[in-house]
Image (cartoon, rainbow, N blue to C red):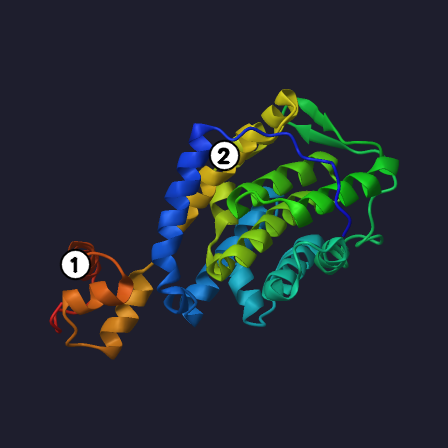
Amino acid sequence: MMKSSYKPPFTITSKIVSLVGDISELVGALSAIETQIAMPKLRKENFVKTITGTLEIEGNTLGAEKITAMLDGKRVLGSVREIAEVKGAITVYEKLGSYRYKKEGDLLLVHKELMSEILKNAGSYRKTQVGVGGANGVTHIAPPADRVPQLMGDLFAWLDNTTEHPLIVSSVFHYEFEFIHPFIDGNGRMGRLWQTLILREWKSFFEFVPIESVVRERQRQYYEALENGGVDGESTVFIEFMLECIFEAVSSVNTDEIILQYLANNPKATAAQMADFLHITVRAVEKQIAKLKAEGQAGASGEC
């Protein structure tokens, strides 16, 4: 891809620097137990959280239980559109590792797979003017349709050449994508998915970190950050917001299942051995074991 002079406007603040550092530290620790994070049960649990979160932001009401049932091949009750939305999301998130985040053609392909049962023109940029609505009416008028191909080309050229940290790059892309709003429908889902795809390229275990679920919990602030970015004319406030969400998502990666599986395989393991396995302190292991025992999930047998 040819170099572009376009650079999305944003400012690297002390808050951004601090959050990037904090997230990177957590990521370093979790990378050591990536294979445990990707265990089938934990992977499925986070997969469901991701799909549920990103679709609930768009008003889908099927919920985690029905989405889990659909993953298991069961029939569920719901509107045709809501079921089609879940099927599309399952398709693209299951294939996340096959998409190339720097390729504009892959973005169009993902949109087609995500929205094929919903839109006739899935996989094509919009040909009409669109506005983004909020509680107080239209909050953003997207750029004219005839500018979309050039704007997306510039964005991907920047993506291909930027040397910024992936945490920042993914957030900037997310914001710029929502600002351009290149499709008639599905823009929110695509922006969140592409941020995850960029992060996955940096550290593969992000495929199993349900950032979308955290965004869903902070949905009002999410839209406010997008709107405030439009007012400011740059994505700084949105970058800060998304980094907060990423930090929360990474911090809440569930190690309970990992610990229980380890204990099942190593019933006589000591706290020191488990701490070494998980790359955390002995005290942290002891606290988690005590919590699991209090919840009745871990037996009293074993050295821990």
Would you call the spot at circle 2 few (<14 residues within 10 Å), some (14-19), or many (20 or more)?
many
Residue 219 left/right relative to 296: right
Is the residue 294 above or below the residue 221 in the image? below
Instruction: Give the residue type at disc 1.
Output: Val
Which residue sits at x=57%, y=48%? Answer: 54
Query: Which label number is shown at residue 31?
Result: none
Whichever of labels 2 and 1 marks the residue nearer the N terminus, that label is: 2
Instruction: Give the residue type at disc 2.
Output: Phe
Numbered circles on residues, count: 2
Q: Quadrant of residue 3?
A: top right
Residue 99 placed where, x, y %? 66, 62
Q: Quadrant of residue 294?
A: bottom left
Is the residue 179 above or below the residue 58 in the image? above
In the picture of the structure, the residue carrying the numbered disc 2 is 241
Residue 77 placed where, x, y %? 61, 60
Which residue sits at x=73%, y=46%? Answer: 157
Q: Quadrant of residue 66?
A: bottom right
Query: Which label number is shown at residue 282?
Result: 1
